[in-house]
Image (cartoon, rainbow, N blue to C red):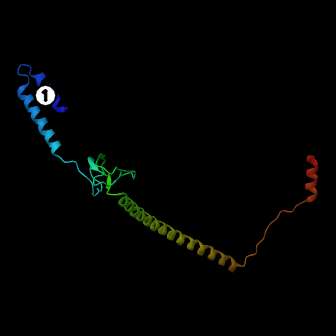
């Protein structure tokens, strides 16, 4: 499309010569670009791909369904025939469903181990705090025992007669 625009622009700019020298140069540049695109082979990922740039590729080659996994974790299964797809930057192509399951299991196991280590560190830090609090309570209990303090509970006296009189006044 850009080549066609360049040719038409040259022709419109130079009406007397038909834009001939510039039209020819634009056509040659377009032909070279087309040849470069056609000469570039489309990558095939029969053996898989770990990340990479955004590109078109052929998957499902070798008669085996492959799994394309995006960076966000979503995945889809390809047909067992050569299929042209657009791979996004960072996409992983697993050479088989079994390979995808193994990789997923390995990553889940690694994440689980990381989380277990984090939880152990957290619990150990809480264990230290609990032991410190137990020590403080124990020392306070010992101090109170050593002082042999008497416990006095002040309970207000209850005048039953005045209570009945108040209930009677309310109309109960």
**Residue 159: image location, x then y, percent:** 90, 59
Nearer to me, 39 or 72: 39
- The picture places residue 81, in percent across and down from the top left corner, at 30, 49
Residue positioned 64% across, 74% down in the render:
140
Q: At numbered mark 1, what does the secondary structure look like: helix, strand or loop? A: helix
Q: Quadrant of residue 100?
A: bottom left
**Number of marks in the image?**
1
Q: Residue at x 41, y 62 (%)?
A: 105
Question: Within the image, what quadrant is residue 5 found in?
Answer: top left
Locate the N terminus and report the quarter of the image it occupies. Answer: top left
Q: Is residue 92 left or right of residue 148?
A: left
Q: Residue at x 16, y 29 (%)?
A: 4
Residue identified by numbered label 1: 7
Compared to residue 12, the image places residue 166 above or below, namely: below
Give percent across and percent down for residue 45: 27, 54
Pick the front one: 158 or 100: 100
Q: Is residue 99 above or below residue 123?
A: above
Give the crowd class for mark 1: few <14, some 14-19, many >=20 residues within 10 Å: many
Q: Residue at x 45, y 68 (%)?
A: 117
Q: Nearer the viewer, residue 80 or 66?
A: 80
Q: Residue furthest top?
A: 16
Apparent side of residue 160 relative to residue 83 in the rendered image (left or right): right
Q: Is residue 62 above or below residue 8?
A: below
Task: From the viewer's perspective, tell me whether residue 130 is left or right of residue 46.
Answer: right
Residue at the bottom extreme of this rendering = 146
Q: Nearer the viewer, residue 164 or 7?
A: 7
Q: Residue 59's spot in the image, x, y percent?
A: 29, 51
């Amino acid at each position: 499309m850009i080549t066609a625009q360049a040719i038409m622009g040259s022709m419109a700019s130079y009406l007397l010569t038909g834009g001939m020298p510039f039209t020819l140069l634009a056509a040659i540049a377009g032909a070279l670009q087309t040849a470069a695109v056609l000469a570039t082979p489309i990558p095939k990922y029969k053996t898989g791909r770990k990340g990479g740039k955004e590109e078109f590729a052929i998957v499902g080659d070798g008669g085996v369904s492959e799994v394309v996994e995006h960076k966000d974790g979503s995945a889809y299964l390809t047909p067992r025939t050569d299929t042209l797809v657009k791979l996004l930057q960072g996409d992983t192509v697993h050479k088989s469903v079994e390979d995808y399951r193994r990789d997923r299991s390995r990553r889940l196991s690694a994440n689980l181990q990381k989380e277990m280590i984090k939880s152990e560190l957290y619990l150990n830090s809480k264990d230290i705090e609990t032991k410190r609090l137990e020590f403080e309570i124990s020392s306070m209990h010992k101090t109170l025992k050593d002082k042999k303090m008497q416990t006095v509970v002040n309970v207000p006296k209850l005048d039953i007669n005045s209570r009945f009189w108040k209930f009677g006044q309310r109309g109960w």
